[in-house]
Image (tube, rainbow, N blue to C red):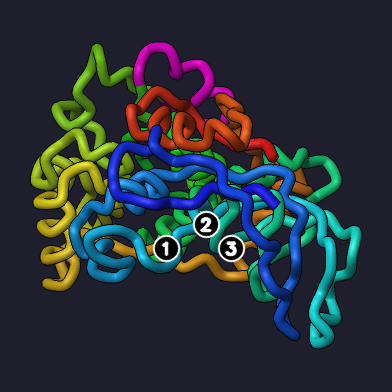
């Protein structure tokens, strides 16, 4: 089968297709015929080997293990291990695995949920990391309650597009999105009550205050964001654009201040919840551009350059 493997650290354009054996199937595993794989900023960090701690875990001076790239995946079940009871060959599923940028991938069965019939493989592959990050950030770390107000800085990206919709589904009374001029109408169509064009207006200088601010952009100082919160409000920080700022958010979070910095944990129950929201018409994927498998490196570079709105997907 064909798969994208990483031979060196460096720009994603150096990624190439390799001919490799199909992954082996364990007793509790699912072998998936991959139809689509979502692209995340996480992929770029692994390809570049930054921050440096990634190289400590993957190998120095070049990757020696976990060379397969890609996490978000959607496809058809090809085969299941003998201990798998809930999924069967032919089922359409989505979820997460190691090595999604390939013709076949394998992972434990609880990494997958059934794809809602109304979703395409392209739309389903966009879901796992971005949608679960939005859900956990709002529900678990932002402690969002019905009737509260939410602002998303970076509302037109992968996490933001799901976040606007999930906030509404969780009962937010007012959802504000911050994005560039060209994305204003798209963000409004997802259910945002207000959309602020950051090229024309600095939301931190306005008088509006919010119960939860979900920062995906890292474009504003953390101090300015915290001042834009209501008393008792929480800043959910999710931007890896600046490592010093990430460390500041982490320290404030550990000190019990009104900042939550977290790592997403992709859980089966959360994937299932999002699938049910899709089925109910409460959440939809926004996919911006599709690349073929051979151009996975270009897809990762495109995401990192900040061109995408919604999600970029690799079709296999």
Front disc: 3 or 2: 3
| Residue at (61% x, 37% y) in the render | 293
Q: Is residue 187 part of the magenta span, yes or no?
A: yes
Q: Quadrant of the C terminus?
A: top right
Query: Badge 3 is on which residue?
Result: 97
| Residue at (35% x, 48% y) in the render | 47
Number of on-image labels? 3
Marks 1 & 2, CB-CB < 8 Å contact:
yes
The answer to whether residue 175 is seen in the rendering is no
Callout 3: few (<14), some (14-19), or many (20+) C-alpha neighbours within 10 Å? Answer: many
Q: Is residue 300 part of the magenta span, yes or no?
A: no
SS for callout 1:
loop
Callout 1: few (<14), some (14-19), or many (20+) C-alpha neighbours within 10 Å? Answer: some
Magenta residues span: 180-194
Q: Is residue 32 above or below residue 41?
A: below
The image shows residue 76 at horizontal and vertical percentages of 81, 54
Query: Badge 2 is on which residue?
Result: 132
SS for callout 2:
helix
Q: Earlier in the sequence, mark 1 or mark 2?
A: 2
Query: Badge 1 is on which residue?
Result: 264
The image shows residue 6 at horizontal and vertical percentages of 42, 51
């Amino acid at each position: 089968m064909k798969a994208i493997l990483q031979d060196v650290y460096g720009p994603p354009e150096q990624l190439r297709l390799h001919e490799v054996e199909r992954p082996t199937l364990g007793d509790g595993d699912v072998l998936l015929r991959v139809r689509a794989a979502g692209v995340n900023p996480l992929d770029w960090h692994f390809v570049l080997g930054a921050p440096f701690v990634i190289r400590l875990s993957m190998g120095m001076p070049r990757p020696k293990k976990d060379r397969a790239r890609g996490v978000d995946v959607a496809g058809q079940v090809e085969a299941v291990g003998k201990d798998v009871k809930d999924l069967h060959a032919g089922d359409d599923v989505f979820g997460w695995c190691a090595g999604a940028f390939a013709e076949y991938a394998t992972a434990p069965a609880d990494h997958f949920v059934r794809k809602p019939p109304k979703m395409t493989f392209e739309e389903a592959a966009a879901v796992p990391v971005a949608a679960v990050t939005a859900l956990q950030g709002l529900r678990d770390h932002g402690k969002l309650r019905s009737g509260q107000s939410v602002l998303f800085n970076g509302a037109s990206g992968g996490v933001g597009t799901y976040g606007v919709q999930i906030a509404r589904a969780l009962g937010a009374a007012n959802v504000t999105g911050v994005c560039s001029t060209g994305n204003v109408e798209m963000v409004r169509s997802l259910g945002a009550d207000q959309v602020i064009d950051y090229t024309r207006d600095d939301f931190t200088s306005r008088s509006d205050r919010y119960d939860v601010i979900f920062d995906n952009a890292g474009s504003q100082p953390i101090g300015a964001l915290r001042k834009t919160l209501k008393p008792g409000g929480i800043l959910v920080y999710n931007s890896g654009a600046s490592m010093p700022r990430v460390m500041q958010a982490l320290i404030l979070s550990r000190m019990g201040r009104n900042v939550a910095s977290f790592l997403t944990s992709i859980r089966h129950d959360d994937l299932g919840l999002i699938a049910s929201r899709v089925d109910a018409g409460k959440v939809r994927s926004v996919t911006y551009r599709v690349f073929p498998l051979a151009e996975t490196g270009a897809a990762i570079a495109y995401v990192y350059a900040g061109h995408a709105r919604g999600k970029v997907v690799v079709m296999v």
